[in-house]
Image (cartoon, helix red, strand yellow):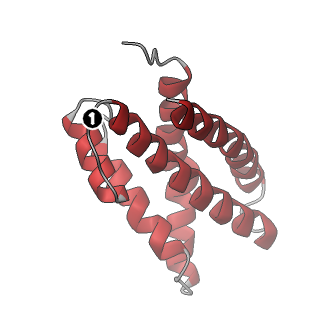
Amino acid sequence: MRRLHERIENFERAFILFQNMRNNYVADKYSDSNRLALTQSFEIVFELGWKVLKDYLFTKDIEVFTPRDSIKAAFSANILPKAQIWIDMAKDRNASSHEYNMEKVDIILERISSVYYNELLNFSEQFKNKDFNE
């Protein structure tokens, strides 16, 4: 349980940074530094998010090892209501590291700053208020 609490704390710190980078990006979408900062902070917060899921599932005696398996198991356990958004996040997280076509990057950044931001905000609220003794 201690590992899960640490993971949630790390996620929360990363989410605050992500939120700030997202706000900077929304204020100036043409700044290269804002674009890069949003991409990097998203990659970090997504990695920590799926690992929170993994650790939480472990407390429920569900063992998973990959982001995709964690997302599917969390959806099946009614922990994650919007699994498809998380699958899309995983794809865009992987693509953001290897995409050099700026039109495609812009599409990913728009999803990060809107759809994914809202989903990660909901996720953050869900785990902030989670009773781990249930």
What residue is rendered at 49% in x and 29% in y?
1
For the residue pair 79 and 57, the one nearer the viewer reads as: 57
Q: Would residue 59 be found to the left or right of residue 52 on screen? A: left
Q: Circle 1 sits on which residue?
A: 61
User: What percent of the width, then of the height, locates residue 13?
Assistant: 71, 40
Indicate whether 9 appears above or below 109: above
Q: Would residue 7 be found to the left or right of residue 53 on screen? A: right
Report the residue that reaches farthest toward the left: 76
Q: Residues within 10 Å of mark 1 (few under 14, many from 20)?
A: few
Q: Secondary structure at mark 1?
A: loop
Indicate whether 128 appears above or below 17: above
Residue 7 falls in which quadrant of the image? top right
User: What percent of the width, then of the height, locates residue 107?
Assistant: 50, 67
Indicate whether 8 appears above or below 133: below
Residue 115 visible to the viewer: no
Mark 1: amino acid: Asp
Residue 90 falls in which quadrant of the image? bottom left
User: What percent of the width, then of the height, locates residue 109?
Assistant: 57, 63
Report the residue that reaches farthest toward the bottom: 100
What residue is rendered at 29% in x and 39% in y?
74
What residue is rendered at 46% in x and 14% in y?
131
Q: Would residue 89 be found to the left or right of residue 84 on screen? A: right
User: What percent of the width, then of the height, locates residue 122?
Assistant: 49, 31
Residue 130 visible to the viewer: yes
For the residue pair 115 and 88, the one nearer the viewer reads as: 88
